[in-house]
Each structure stands twice: as C-alpha cells, then as structure tokens.
Amino acid sequence: MSTDIRTLVSQSSRVLGAAGLDDFIWGHSSARDPEGRGAWLKRSGIALSEVGPDDVQLVSRDGEVLAGSGDRHIEYPIHTEIYAARPDVDGVVHIHPPHAVALAASGVALRPVSHQATLFTPPEPPRFTETSDLIRSAELGAAVARALADRNAVFLVNHGIVAVGPDLQTATVTALLLEEACAQQLLTCGYGGIASWTDDAQALEKRERIYSPKALNKVWEHLLRRLTD
C-alpha cells in the first residue's frame, strides 16, 4: 500500500510541476496514510517536478519522519491538521500559484467568469489571514483547517492556496482549476473590469454538470498521459 501511495504523491507532484507550479523547491502535496499514522508527502529540498516515489516520506502528526529519508517540509502541519479535522479528505495540495496569490492579495472576490470558478463559488472561497508566514506549527495548521471548514480550497492570503479532495487525484485537479479560475478572472480584469459573471443558481448547476467526480478523475487521467507523452 505504501508503495502505491508514494507513486501517487510523486505523480501529483510532477503533474503540478508540469503545469508550471514548481516554485523552485517549495510546495507539496500529500495523501492520508490509510493506517492513520499521518501524511505521505514529498521530502523538502527538491522541486515538485523532480519527485519520484523514493522522495516521498510518511510524516506523523507531531512531525516525526516514520518512513523515507531526507529533510521534511516545515509546513507538514497543513496536511496533518487538515486530515485530523476532515475525515472526508484523503488528499491535500499546498502550492503558491501566481494568479491565485494575486487575486487573494487584491481582496477582490473570485467570480464565476469561467467554468473553472464554478467549482469554488458560490459561496466565495474562504481566506486565511491569521498569518502570511509559513504554517509551521500544529496550532497554525489547525487554524488553516478551521478556515477551510468544509470547502474544497482556501486562499492563504499573501502566501498560496490549499486544495483538498476525497483523494489526492481530486485535490490535485482542484488546485489546478483554482489557478485557472483566478488567471481567467485577472485576464478579464485586464480588459477593463468584470461586466458579467454566471449567477449563483446557474453556477451551482454548472458545478454539478461539469465537475462531477467522474469528470475530475478523467482530467487526472489526462494529466498523467501528458506526463508520459
């Protein structure tokens, strides 16, 4: 089981890297350990696009590396505290996508000017503003989990995003779609503002129709094919 999880975390990492979201050596995705021991996430010091199965560690809730080698990410509490708070979540992604960071910092609400944004709004995605520093303690990780609440993503204002899902495949695709939604809105703003966006009722209909679990899994399969093409 652990070998399969290591492969999944490495695939998620490389998918994010292939999308241009490496941010040098920062950012990480994880899968919940099925035995309840913590989170499987990449070691620190390498880029997302470099991660192989051997670069994935099992980290306990108190930060002990239980399996794997190398240094561990200081922000592991993002993952472990969300898993503790959200039994429905088995995958967590934390990255620093430029358009999502810009939109969150602007204070402007994410609007459904595109299909992608309907996965997140209405209601508007939550924003974590307690700190823009690294999430380096259980207390801060728990605060992020509280801000996330029952949603699929949260903006860490002046920092990055966290996206979650019932599995890491879904969390990874969700993170990519949030960045696309923010990029589309900022592109729209470049034409002089936002003249229109989908109303709440239709946005919710589109969310159900376009972004079903089956569709998100098909996107994941497409992204894996792109890695090997």
Image: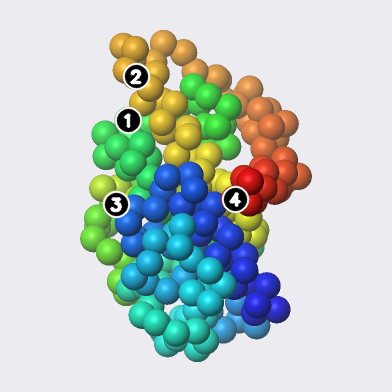
Residue 139, quarter of the rendered image: bottom left
Are discs 1 and 2 less than 8 Å apart at CB?
Answer: yes
| Three-letter amino acid code at the position of disc 2 | Cys
Which residue was labeled with disc 2?
189
The picture quadrant where one finds residue 201 is top right
- Callout 2: SS: helix
Q: Position of residue 184 (x, y in %)?
A: 44, 26
Q: Which residue is mark 1?
A: 108
- Earlier sequence position, callout 3 versus callout 1: 1
Of the residues under marks 1 and 2, which one precedes in the sequence? Answer: 1
The image position of residue 117, as x and y in percent, is: 52, 32
Crowd around label 2: few <14 · some 14–19 · many ≥20 (10 Å): few
| Residue 149 in view | no
Label 2 vs label 4, nearer the camera = 4
Q: Which is nearer the N-term, disc 2 or disc 4? A: 2
Q: Which residue is mark 3?
A: 159
Disc 4 secondary structure class: helix
Q: Tell me: residue 192, above or below residue 17.
A: above
Q: Amino acid at mark 4?
A: Leu
Callout 1 amino acid: Val
Disc 4 marks which residue?
A: 227
Query: From what the image shows, is residue 155 above or below residue 66?
Result: above
Cα–Cα gap, marks 3 and 2: 22 Å
Q: Nearer the viewer, mark 3 or mark 1?
A: 3
Mark 1 or mark 4: which comes first in sequence? 1
